[in-house]
Amino acid sequence: MTEHVLEVRDLVKHFPVRRGLLRRTVGTVKAVDGVSFGLDRGRTLGLVGESGSGKSTLARVLVGIETPTSGQVLLDGQDVARLSRAGRKQLRRDVQMVFQDPYTALNPRMSVGEIVGEPFAIHRVRPPGGRAAAVGELLELVGLDPGHVSRYPHQFSGGQRQRIGIARALALRPRILVCDEPVSALDVSVQGQVVNLLQDLQDELGLSYLFVAHDLGVVRHIAHEVAVMYLGRVVERGPSGAVYDGALHPYTQALLSAAPVPDPSVRLAGPSAADAPGGGAIVLEGDPPSPTDPPAGCPFHTRCWLAPLLGGGRRIPEPCAATRPALEPPRADGGHRTATHDDGEQHGHEHARDEHTGGGPAHLAACHFARPLPAPERVGS
Amino acid sequence: MSGDTSAAAASSAADHDGVVGPGTPLLEVRDLAVEFRTPEGNVRAVDGLSYRVAAGRTLAVVGESGSGKSVSSLAVMGLLPDTARVTHGEVLLAGEDLLSLSRREHRRRCGERIAMVFQDALAALNPVHTVGYQLTEALRRRRGMSRRDAGRRAVELLDLVGVPNARGRVKDYPHQFSGGMRQRVMIATALALDPDVLIADEPTTALDVTVQAQVLRLLAEIQAERRMGLVLITHDLGVVAGMADDVTVMYAGRVVERAPVRDTFGAPAHPYTRALLHSIPSSGAGGDGEGRRLPVIPGRPPSPAALPTGCAFHPRCDTARDVCRTDPPPLEAVAVDRASACHFAAEVLASHDVPPPVEHEEAAHD
């Protein structure tokens, strides 16, 4: 059995909401509410979700910017929380982060050489051959001119700045890169260059990526596996081909259907959209609910397009509003799963299942009525 | 309504001809040039932009950062910053050149007939006034409506854009709305004076996918209902494909291609458009992140202050030849309703009579 480089078990991160003079806790933002997954060497897990789904908080917990409220983060099978001080320092070296905005993530007063070399100083590492040589190599690795070490961030374009951020993240030879929306601030024509760079680096260095993004196209391109988050929970997870071509969860189906595709025959709106083959885009009503007060039962049931259809007379089926669905493989007949999980044992179940499937990651969905919906007709397919 | 867009579009064009007079688009931009004063001298941000928008039609203006797409719409609205000025061209609103008017008069005309929706609704709405106040401001000042009538209209407008509990929410402040709802509020303020033309500058870029779909659908519905002309400024070719009738592609301040959307996406006539279309990672095709490289455009968009000689795209172009490095290509007709600014436009266009090579080894099996 291969051991995951990084494993997350039932991770929870709650933020207290404080009000008033006494800063009394009046509620909790359940940013991440019981997330489990594993990441293997040289693989990419794409984390998809809307704002407020908890994907960025999860990323921050993994790199140690936030401490989890409960649950475990395992690095090479070792529980990070139980590590010694030295062990935690090693963790910081092993797991590095690439940030979304290359304009604010780089200190404008530091030269590129100082930025890329700073991790060596912080961790008191003497790279073989000296720091200057190491910085030069790193710049070359990410496709920048090593002669530019003394330039400042403002002298670079967005794409180049993102390369600087990647070079900095690679300085300490990490094994895992957590990329939080690494290309969404870049022009379309430049996005591809950075995505390709990340893929090359993965092949070359055997890196594992947790790739957080809202752009479904980019994630499909780069990720081997995809996890879809909604209100702090993973609602669907599986190999990216399986998720994109045969999404099981109605939320994933809506996300995929709402993403604009560069094909003029797929109209997003207007009279033709509704009559389009396949009924056109699934447009969800309303905004995601607040993570301070997630709905009971299935967190998605308040916006679900499928539930009212199942209930016949516009009524949502009882299990959707009453019981929280577990993340599990869909039933073959696509019908209602009667057995709901026992709350306490959720993550145990999942792990058992992951190991059973052996051959590859299973395709799981947290929906009482999970069933595949064929991917809509798309350009080039 | 019929499900056939082309028929709908044709009939809308016919209706429009009947209303405004044959051949007169609602808004027409002719050969617009905008320059910025900088310490390094004058920088031309927009150079020779022309487009026309008819009633009930959607024109997409596509480009990357620095392409001049946003600056050009500010020029149309008379909202350019003091460091910029229009050096050339006309902006015709129902036949009248707005640029020949005083700035004040220009703004007044626009206020009545052209409205604008910006990307960042939180920045565009005033945080210290209620949404209701901002909705009624224009009605009271320009239309001289009473406070009570304007208030009633504000509720109607919020209702129209699908803000739930509109009556209760007019008293709320912008920060009390979610991103999608704020964008709806901004659309409502834009609609307050019943504009003929709506210019939407990246209206959904800051929104989540599911909310983006709602807002785009709303825009399309309102446009169809009111027969507005819609100018959609965006970098997202998916949005263009889903919403627009016609597209104008800008690169480094110039129009490089102009065409009906269906034609461009099927067979682009400019290498830049072609490369852009190829570089979109699609959520609909491909495998599991295994060994596939995205086709990319090498390099990056040039700074308007240091444009390459000849065709501005030549350093990044896969079909560039000697002439491209010396002579800027003019925007010329390549087919009915289509124009391209490329020396080899005919060649580029012809190469797409055959479907483009499949980039992904494993196409999806739908």
Image (cartoon, coloured by chain):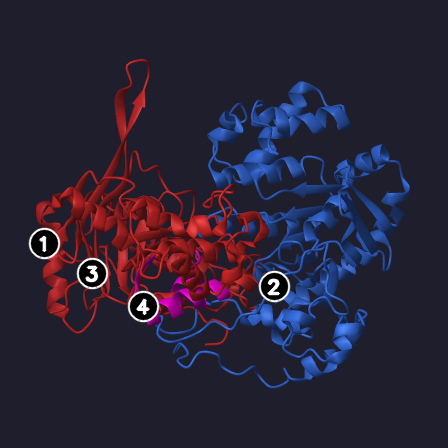
Chain colours: A red, B blue
> On the image, numbered disc 1 is attached to which residue?
A348
Inspect this view and state whether residue B283 appears.
no
- Secondary structure at badge 1 equals helix
- Chain under label 2? B
State yes or no: discs 4 and 2 in contact (Cβ < 8 Å).
no
Image side of residue B334 versus residue B354, left or right? right
Which of the 4 image quadrants contains residue B150? top right
Question: How far from the left and from the top, in percent, is residue A284?
Answer: 42, 50
Instruction: Say the numbered circle drawn on residue B2.
Output: 2
Is A218 inside the magenta-drawn segment? Answer: yes
Nearer the observer, B41 or A78: B41
Q: Nearer the viewer, mark 2 or mark 3?
A: 3
Q: Which residues, given as a range, are shown in magenta?
A: A192-220
- The quarter of the picture where the N terminus of chain A appears is bottom left
Query: Which numbered disc flags the more N-terminal residue, 1 or 4?
Result: 4
Amino acid tagged 3: Val
Inspect this view and state whether residue B76 appears.
yes
